[in-house]
Amino acid sequence: MAATASQRSASGSVRARPPCFRVCKPFTRTSDFGSERERFRAPAVLVVEMKRARNQLKVVRAPVRVLIVDDHALFAEALMLTLGIDERIDVVGHAADGAEAVALTRTLRPDVVLMDLHMPGMDGIQATKAVRRVSPRVRVVMVTASASPQCRQWAREAGAVRYVTKDTPARDLLDTVVEVAAGAPSLFSPSPGRETATLGRTA
């Protein structure tokens, strides 16, 4: 075939035409489209599965550090035994009066203080205020035989977050300790009967 004018060089020779290639993508079967969708969907499925597994993991927390403050040795001992059966709680000390409670709060750094109301010298109201000054993060639970509305009001004003009577059921007291340590808001039941059962009745 004769070369066209555009294919001739200035010297009259014919230029070689460069080869031409066509690239064709192989046909993809319908099943391949399905596998592609699975491939791109896999990361999202993996994220969901990881979240599900994480939610099912048992969260292990350090035991709640509790300081018991009560001038009655027998009641304090009974309280220690009651708290000791719960693996969520660790009793770190016992104070027999308010002044000792303040000193032990400073050194032992408890999460929760179970405070008796009526004690010689510095009573539970004064001790609660002092303990809160030493450690503002500590949660004070007033534990007393008195269900007096006036005493409950004093305890609240002093900074206690709960007020329970000494006949509160052991299970309720244990749950209260764990709840307040976890940051549960201050709660004073309007009915003293709601906060009662078997720990003893000594003030």
Image: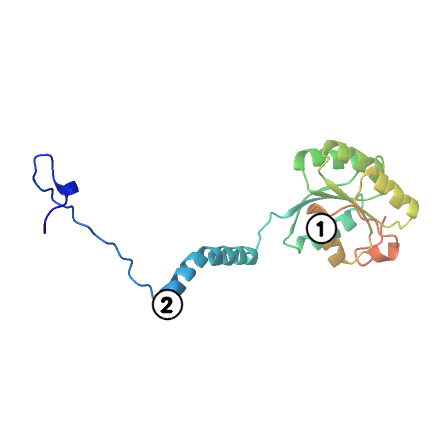
Residue at left 66%, top 37%?
108
Residue type at mark 1: give it. Answer: Glu
The amino acid marked with disc number 2 is Ser
Asked whether residue 41 is in view, the answer is yes
The answer to whether any part of residue 123 appears in the image is no
**Residue 106 vertical position relative to residue 186 in the rendered view, above or below:** above
Distance from Cα at disc 1 to Cα at disc 2? 55 Å
Q: Which of marks 1 and 2 is in front?
A: 2
Seen from the viewer's position, the closer of residues 23 and 180 is 23
Question: Residue 31: which disc?
Answer: 2
Callout 2: 10 Å neighbours few (<14), some, many (20+)?
few
Q: How many labels does the image show?
A: 2
Residue 4: percent from left, percent from top: 14, 45
What residue appears at the point 87 percent right and 57 percent down from the top-left corner?
193
Q: Nearer the viewer, residue 22 or 197?
A: 22
- Disc 2 is placed on an element classified as helix
User: In the drawing, does residue 160 fall left or right of residue 4?
Assistant: right
**Residue 145 percent coordinates (x, y):** 86, 50
Which of the two labelled residues, at mark 1 and mark 2, occupies the earlier sequence position?
2
Where's residue 47, x and y in %? 49, 55
Q: Residue at x 53, y 55 (%)?
A: 51
Colour setup of the view: rainbow
Residue 164, x across and y down, in percent: 82, 51
In the rendered structure, find residue 101 and report the number of the disc placed on it.
Answer: none
User: On the image, numbered disc 1 is attached to which residue?
Assistant: 179
Q: What element carries label 1?
A: helix
Residue 183 shown left or right of residue 29 in the figure = right
The answer to whether 132 is drawn above or below residue 199 in the figure is above
- Residue at image coords 16%, 49%: 19
